[in-house]
Amino acid sequence: MDDKNLEIKVELNVDISCQSCVDSISKELREKLENTKLVEHDIPEQRIVLQGTDLTQDILETIKNTGRNATICGLSSTTTTTSTSPSSSTCHKKQETVSGSAVCSLGLIENWQKGCGGSGGVGSKGVYGVIRLLRASTTKTLFEGRITGLKPGKHSLVVHEFGNLMNGCDDLGEPFISNVENNNNNNNNNNNNNNNNNNNNNNNNNNNKNINKCKEILNKIIGTSDVKQDGKAEFRVLSDKYDFWDLIGRSIVLHSQDSKYSPIEDLNNNNNNKNIVNSESDKILGERVACGIISRAASIGQNHKKVCPCDGTTAI
């Protein structure tokens, strides 16, 4: 299983009223998206479920192009796990779908509350995008989405330790390191220290530590996109660096390695932040352009809201 071939299911609220509505959506999907198909629909509930490998943003825009209102209300993996439960006489095997979904909005969108549903991030003026996270298996997490309004150059997504947006992107801590990776790094450091006790090698040891620190920071990058003139960065990355549930409440930061941006804006607090390089990791990863909180989201069949609590808009 890799990031390009991993199929996911996407549930949407769509204003459909008859079978011809469903048929027109299916036709649009066949013509515009090669890798996504409609697999379920419920006309009375005005819900559809799609399955494929296209970006969720492309799916949403394709359906809206039919002239219908649409919102994503659930995301699920197609991966199943087998669990065995003993009984008095035999063991029963049960297939269960791996579940877990989250969303993180980076940058600004007017009238949204900060942190609400992951949709109230902060960022430089004009920069905005949504990254969706999906627990693809017991060991892997899918990060996918698109960010727009960017300048040409390399941009990287990185999970950071904290979810505090009160001071823009400045108080989010260092790139997040999972407990498993921490243990591995500690073991490696102990081994290195045991093998390098000669005082004459202090300079070499310091150089090695700096190199290892740099590699460690770069290893925290979820994905890197080389943004062109259209100003778009797209990501679809399957990562085994994190336990999915350890990510909720932390943050994702978009770092710019090549371009300089205007100060980060916060529409809710009407203040500007200076985009300062405030950590050792920023010197390697680059300027913090936009950020947002990773918030738990609904899996398929879990979200029955028709009105968004963040901005009061009707979903369909």
Image: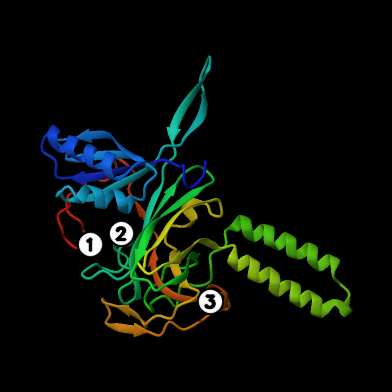
- 184 vs 34, left or right, is right
Image spot of residue 70 (x, y percent): 20, 49
Residue 201 at x, y = what percent? 85, 77
Give the amino acid at mark 1.
Answer: Cys
The answer to which of marks 3 and 2 sits earlier in the sequence is 2
Q: Which residue is mark 2?
A: 117
Task: Say if mark 1 contacts mark 3, CB within 8 Å.
Answer: no
Q: Is disc 2 surrounded by few (<14), some (14 to 19) or many (20+) residues within 10 Å?
A: many
- Residue 203 is left or right of residue 25, and the answer is right
Give the image quarter of residue 99: top left
Q: Pointer 3: what residue?
A: 282
Which circle's residue, 2 or 1, is located before the other in the chain?
2
Assign a secondary structure to mark 1: loop
Q: Residue at x 57, y 58 (%)?
A: 178
Q: Position of residue 157 (x, y in %)?
A: 47, 64
Amino acid residing under circle 2:
Gly
Q: Are marks 2 and 1 in contact (CB under 8 Å)?
A: yes
Label 2 and label 1: CA atoms lie apart by 7 Å
Residue 104 appears in the picture as rendered = no
Q: For the residue marked with disc 3, what is the amino acid? A: Asp
Q: Residue reaching furthest top?
A: 89
